[in-house]
Image (cartoon, rainbow, N blue to C red):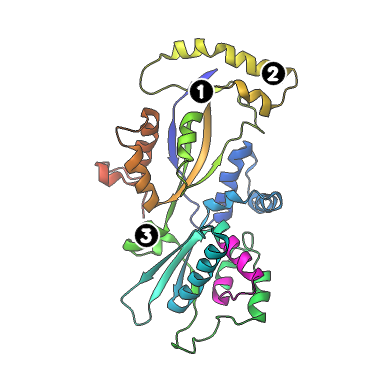
Amino acid sequence: MKIIEPSAKLVRGYEDKPEELIELCGRICYDSQDKIAPGTAQKFCERLKRSGHTSVFEHANIVLKVSNSTSIAVERIANSYERATRLPAFLRFDKIDGCRHKHHFVSGNVRAWNTVFDYTSKLYDSIPMCVIEALNAYPMLFDVEPWKKQANTYKIYNVRDPHGGKEYKANVIPPSQLPKWAYEQHTTATFLITCDRGISHELVRHRTASFSQQSTRYCKANKSGEIEIIKPSDGSVSAESLLDTLGDVNEAYNDALEVGISPQTARCVLPTCLATRLYMTMTLERWRDFLKLRTSPAAHPDMRVIAEQIQRQLFPDEIGDSNADWKR
């Protein structure tokens, strides 16, 4: 049994590679990160679609800059979806003022775009062709052909608005091109978090976030050779005492696996302090809400350790840290 430190590391370098971000986050569930290689993202995403494990697609965020008319059309579609299903669409809308024809920003994760538009096409509703063409920049993530058929058969917003004379336009943009006032609402950040199972249960209560977590059902907890645990940060127990106390647990788990008991059954003996790794994604706006709660003195000491690491990387200037890991 091995004691490791809790940590939170900002994931960077995937702004224009949503497919690779999805693979990175998804493979944590199966503990198969060692299989990531050039060209593997496409097959992995296809496998996720076939298995229905589409929650992983929530880690990839797509931002569109659209004309006023396009935004009205997409927002109407999202509202119709919410009214019909009583489920949130998870698409975010905003406006840009200061020009003759107002433009908007619309953003959402890949799963949200697919869910809303797939549902809409089945209702014979119209989807803006310009949005379909914009999302088609990621054929690995969006199957737009059914949407195109629907758009070509029924009224589609790909011409000038007969009422306002405004064009329907949409373009995918990187978050770095967002104006300052819209940046935090439409930009997401993903962290790789290492913590114990107890803290992970608290993390997943933040329902505006998206998660992919290491499985103890499909993966062996001792795959690295030893069961890893997180020592409480409040100093209430020494490392030696913790290891002595959990020695029987380590032996019981290993014995269970050796006699052929599956990991999903053998895990019942594992402690709450078992180390786990997960990817967590939210908009910067929602990360601020998270930090207000989790850096509070009322938060669990182990949670504060994680939250303070996140704060130092996302908003270093606000806590007097000049070594920024997060740059616009």
What is the number of the mark on residue 229? 1
Q: Amino acid at mark 2?
A: Ala
Q: Amino acid at mark 3?
A: Tyr
**In terms of secondary structure, where does tag 3 sit?**
helix
Where does the magenta region start and end?
113-132
The residue most toward the right is 260
Residue 242 at x, y = what percent?
Answer: 47, 14
Residue 207 at x, y = what percent?
Answer: 47, 47
Identify which residue is drawn at 46% across, 73% down: 71
Q: CA distance from mark 2 to mark 1?
A: 19 Å
Identify which residue is drawn at 62% across, 65% down: 119
Q: Nearer the viewer, residue 147 or 327?
A: 147
Identify which residue is drawn at 58% across, 39% down: 28
Residue with the mark numbered 2: 256
Quarter of the image that includes the N terminus: top right
**Looking at the image, residue 181 lies above or below residue 189:** below
Q: Which comes before the other along the chain, label 1 or label 3?
A: 3
Q: Nearer the viewer, mark 3 or mark 2?
A: 2
**Looking at the image, residue 148 lies above or below residue 311:** below
**In terms of secondary structure, where does tag 2 sit?**
helix
Residue with the mark numbered 3: 183
Given contact means CB atoms under 8 Å apart, are the residues at marks 2 and 1 in contact? no
Q: Which comes before the other along the chain, label 3 or label 2?
A: 3
Q: Which comes before the other along the chain, label 2 or label 1?
A: 1
